[in-house]
Image: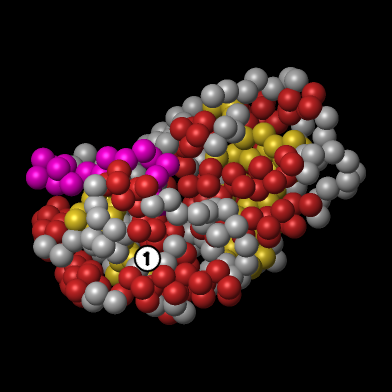
């Protein structure tokens, strides 16, 4: 079976890397195509996954429309050479549109309800759309809900083991509290009209947290000089270890908030739209605290973060929550494999020459 996986964001590498490894071990051929965005291609290289580069995206509504046309054309060229039996991706339109043109099944995963433009451009062309059971939106007959979170595709204990060497890299003691603070760029298609935390409240948060714990900031954009001194400096593939051993994750990233949750670390998440999965992780497990971007909620988020750090027993209690999450949710990678194999009509392994006409980017 030939499977084409298109990567549009660094997080998508994590979603599909274990799926790819296991499917290749079963004798199937998997081809990755990747947008050149932030660390996506660095992650592919890290995990020794060859890929085809489809170039950088564009900012702004007009730029994103022009890139849609380019990406469809580029992906159609690649797929015509590789001849996939199935397209697999996390919610973005190019693979599903090309799959429809080629008459091939397109399986799409999504956990972002407010990505309405991507919904409109993707779902009409997709075969199935898989979402967590807590997904707020009804996507119609193509939607299949599963009991779990996307982050369990790579942070499930079957695939992830925390490495305590991160403490030495961060130069923190084993009993010392530290916080990961995450600021985002708000440049994604679904982030139009968002502003995030004000600079004044970013400074206020870092100052308040630094009185109770070491603070490490990770930011998609530039930081003012007074905050730059807090920027975390570790190998990019060690961030999950840092989150696991931290006392709190605070910031504007839904994905990192959920990563923290499934790793047993409490998180503060600020976003006007929110997410069904972070709502679920709050209502069901009490390990994520959701706030809007309003001035009042920014102040409440800082207060909640301080109260968590002031509780010396919180870290042990939250790690037990991780055990509950793992026991009550599915292994997302295993679910992917089960769903994809339903489309394996010939039941035969794929010979190595499947890639003979495809130019791959190697490490």
Residue 344 appears anywhere in the view: yes
- Residue 99 image position (x, y, % from top left): 71, 41
- Which quadrant of the figure has residue 140? bottom right
Q: Quadrant of the N terminus?
A: top right
Decide if residue 294 is in sight here: no
Task: Check the picture and name the quadrant holding the C terminus.
Answer: top right
Q: What is the count of numbered marks?
A: 1
Q: Is residue 270 above or below residue 225?
A: below
Image coords of residue 318 (percent x, y): 38, 73
Q: 43 left or right of 128?
A: left
Q: Quadrant of residue 57?
A: top left
**Residue depicted at 28% across the width and 55% down the height:** 180
Q: Is residue 99 left or right of residue 209?
A: right
**Per the image, is 237 magenta?**
yes
In this view, the residue farthest toward the bottom is: 283
| Residue found 42% across the figure and 42% down from its top | 237
Q: Which residues are magenta?
A: 224-241
The answer to whether 198 appears left or right of 163 in the picture is left
Is 341 in the magenta?
Answer: no
**Rendered position, 209 above or below 242:** below
Q: Residue at x 11, y 58 (%)?
A: 207
Give the vertical position of 34 relative to 116 (above or below). Answer: above
Q: Residue 204, percent across and down?
A: 11, 60
Q: Dot 1 lies on which element?
A: loop
Q: Residues within 10 Å of mark 1 (few under 14, many from 20)?
A: many
| Closer to the camera in the image, 167 or 89 | 167
Q: Percent position (x, y) of residue 305?
A: 23, 69
Residue drawn at 78 percent across, 44 percent down: 26
Residue located beneath label 1 in the image: 265
């Amino acid at each position: 079976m030939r499977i084409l996986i298109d990567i549009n964001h660094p997080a998508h590498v994590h979603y599909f890397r274990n799926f790819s490894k296991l499917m290749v071990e079963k004798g199937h051929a998997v081809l990755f195509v990747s947008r050149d965005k932030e660390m996506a291609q660095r992650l592919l290289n890290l995990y020794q996954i060859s890929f085809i580069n489809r170039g950088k995206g564009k900012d702004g509504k007009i730029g994103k429309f022009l890139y849609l046309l380019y990406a469809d054309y580029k992906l159609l060229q690649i797929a015509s050479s590789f001849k996939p039996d199935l397209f697999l991706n996390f919610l973005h339109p190019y693979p599903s549109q090309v799959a429809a043109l080629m008459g091939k099944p397109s399986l799409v995963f999504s956990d972002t309800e407010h990505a309405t433009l991507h919904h409109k451009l993707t779902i009409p062309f997709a075969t199935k759309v898989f979402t967590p059971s807590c997904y707020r939106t009804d996507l119609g007959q193509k939607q299949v809900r599963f009991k779990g979170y996307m982050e369990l595709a790579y942070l499930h204990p079957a695939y992830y083991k925390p490495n305590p060497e991160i403490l030495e890299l961060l130069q923190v003691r084993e009993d010392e509290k530290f916080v990961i603070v995450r600021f985002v760029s708000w440049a994604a298609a679904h982030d139009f009209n968002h502003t995030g935390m004000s600079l004044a409240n970013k400074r206020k948060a870092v100052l308040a947290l630094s009185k109770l714990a070491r603070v490490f900031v990770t930011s998609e954009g530039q930081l003012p000089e007074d905050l730059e001194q807090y920027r975390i400096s570790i190998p990019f593939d060690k961030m999950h270890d840092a989150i696991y051993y931290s006392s709190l994750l605070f910031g504007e990233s839904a994905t990192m908030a959920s990563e923290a949750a499934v790793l047993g670390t409490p998180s503060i998440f600020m976003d006007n739209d929110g997410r069904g999965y972070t709502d679920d992780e709050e209502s069901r497990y009490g390990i994520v605290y959701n706030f809007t971007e309003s001035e009042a909620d920014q102040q409440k988020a800082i207060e909640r973060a301080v109260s968590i750090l002031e509780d010396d027993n919180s870290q042990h209690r939250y790690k037990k929550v991780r055990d509950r999450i793992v026991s009550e949710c599915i292994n997302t990678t295993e679910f992917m494999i089960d769903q994809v194999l339903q489309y394996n009509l010939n039941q035969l392994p794929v010979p190595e020459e499947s890639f003979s006409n495809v130019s791959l980017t190697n490490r």
